[in-house]
Image: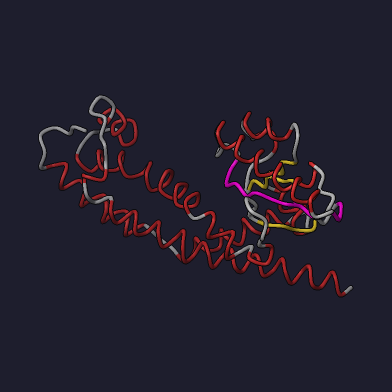
Amino acid sequence: MTDEKNMNHNNEEIIEKAKKFFREIIAENHVKNTEKLENIKEFKVNPFTHKYLANFLTGNDDPKSLAKALIYPRVLGTSITTSFGQNLQTFVNTTLEGYGSTTTGMDIEFIDKLDGRKKYCQIKAGPQTINKDDVTTIRNHFRDVINLGRTNGIPIANMDCVVGVFYGTYNDLSAFYKNLAEDYTVLAGKDFWYHLTGDEDFYNKLTDAIGEIANEFDGTELLEKTINQLAMQLQQVDGIDE
């Protein structure tokens, strides 16, 4: 019973730390990055598609529509996605600090709640976030871990070397991840969090908890102000070049 209480406490702690991380790092950076977008110099505009996208979005290509066509993709897509990727190590060091690894090349170490074995884990943000060079690097790190274990008399199997992907499903994983999965363990989204915490529903609890932070950040006024400022700049130029 004590073990179960400790597990629940640890899981609750992860959720609270994740909310703090999202509030203080991701959301605040998102606001700052949005404020920057009132400056036309923040954009590389494609003059062949810009007016088309404005018309597609709003039905006209007046300056405000042109501004929306530039700002919305950044604010609702690349800005926050990039911020999360850039701050992934901060998430690991703060939210998952209790699982910190002292092994070179590993982000965390944990006892798998399903098979009871110790896992040596590299953390990745999403199912499409590694490339061919990353595969080689990860493989080399895992080989080093296994060799170090052998040297120290600690049996470490390939299955104990894990790539943990924060979100998505196994079917979402790129070919690069599936290449790694031929020899090592790749856990994505719900599966990763289940093996880490022992709570099959933890992934949903975590995403719901972070979703609560949205109630603290109403960007309506900020977006309107940013769009209007950019529209004023667009109105002052005859053409928009890269």
Magenta region: 115-126
Q: Is residue 12 above or below residue 46?
A: below
Residue drawn at (70%, 37%), measured in percent from left and top? 170
Question: In front here: 174 or 68?
Answer: 174
> Which image quarter holds the N terminus?
bottom right
Q: Position of residue 224 (x, y in %)?
A: 29, 54
Q: Residue furthest front?
A: 151
Q: Position of residue 8 (x, y in %)?
A: 77, 69
Question: In front here: 131 or 64?
Answer: 131
Residue drawn at (56%, 65%), measured in percent from left and top? 19
Indicate left or right for 238 with 130 as reference.
left
Residue drawn at (72%, 69%), measured in percent from left and top? 10
Residue drawn at (27%, 53%), measured in percent from left and top? 226
Q: Position of residue 168 (x, y in %)?
A: 64, 42
Asked if the magenta segment contains residue 185, the reply would be no
Asked if the magenta segment contains residue 124, the reply would be yes
Q: Position of residue 206 (x, y in %)?
A: 64, 58
Q: Residue furthest right?
A: 1
Q: In the figure, residue 53 lies in which quadrant?
A: top left
Indicate left or right for 84 with 2 as reference.
left
Q: Residue furthest top?
A: 48
Question: In front here: 3 or 67?
Answer: 3
Q: Is residue 133 above or below residue 1?
A: above
> Which image quarter holds the C terminus?
top left
